Amino acid sequence: MNEPRDPPSNPRRVSAVEHVVAELLDGVMEYRYAPGQRLVEADLTRQFNVSRGTVREAFRRLAADGLIEIVPNRGAVVRRLSQRDLAELFEIRCELEGLAARRAAGNIGDPACRAAFESATAMIWDDAPRLRITDYLDENARFHEAVLKASGNHQLGVVSRQFQLPVIMTQVSALLTPRTLERSLAEHRAIARAILAGDGEEAERMIRAHLQRAARLSKADAAPGQD
């Protein structure tokens, strides 16, 4: 009878759900919620001071994004990808993002496309140390999204997003180190330079190499590596 109740207005209801989604996503990315860990509904309602309905809606959204699974008799569980899952997802991403990088380089002569790409990737030229893994993961996602958008192929972006970059990153983040972050950033810069130079063949080659290295790193430990 003492369960918290969300405000009746829809905007505040959405805000409550989005807050819980963001907190759970950060927790997964920071490995506070590990792959395979059960998310206890009652604990989360107390932690966030929200209703069970809010938590269940947050679970539904995260499940739709592939970050958690709703398991019979267990409830919500942080999704764990097998090594085979990771290998297959990286293989698909190599093909899709290779095409995206090649198309982006072909489109970069268009002033609007170039301006949008330069704006979306401006953060990669910042030399400040990447001190928080969650900030870098967000930067990484924005970079890959910028390549997809510059491809000019909307459906390519839609399909690529179905292959769960956030899910991959929750598992590969376990092996992130300052050295791997620096290498990944250097690769992002090289890919961007190739796209900005209009060199589709080089852009495709470099983004494939970048993803293939990440795939190899993901096999380096039982708790996989980085993108």
Image (cartoon, grey):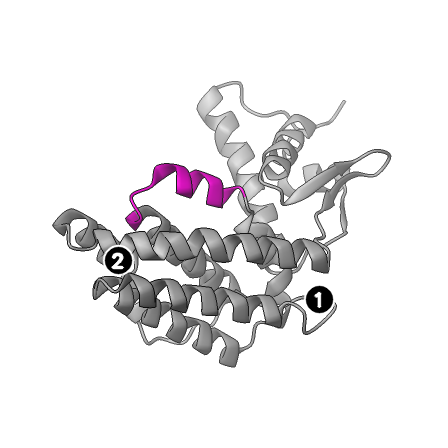
- The image quarter in which residue 130 lies: bottom left
Q: At 44% from the left edge and 38% from the top edge, which residue is drawn?
A: 158
Q: Does the magenta stretch include residue 156?
A: yes
Viewer-side residue, 52 vs 70: 70
Q: Position of residue 6 (x, y in %)?
A: 58, 25
Q: Are marks 2 and 1 in contact (CB under 8 Å)?
A: no
Q: Circle 2 sits on which residue?
A: 105
The residue most toward the top is 8
Q: Where is residue 151 in the image (x, y as percent from the top left)?
A: 31, 48
Nearer the viewer's eye, disc 2 or disc 1?
2
Q: At 71% from the left edge and 57% from the top edge, which residue is drawn?
A: 84
Viewer-side residue, 85 vs 167: 85
Q: Is 18 placed left or right of 217 in the picture? A: left
Real-space CA distance between mark 2 and mark 1, rounded to the nearest whole angstrom: 35 Å
Q: Can residue 224 be seen in this view?
A: yes
Q: Is residue 31 magenta?
A: no
Q: Which type of secondary structure does the marked residue at label 1 adopt?
A: loop
Q: Position of residue 147 (x, y in %)?
A: 34, 54
Q: Which type of secondary structure does the marked residue at label 2 adopt?
A: helix
Viewer-side residue, 25 vs 163: 163
Q: Which of marks 2 and 1 is nearer the N terminus?
A: 2
Q: Is 154 placed left or right of 159 in the picture? A: left
Q: Circle 1 sits on which residue?
A: 223
What span is colored magenta in the figure?
150-162
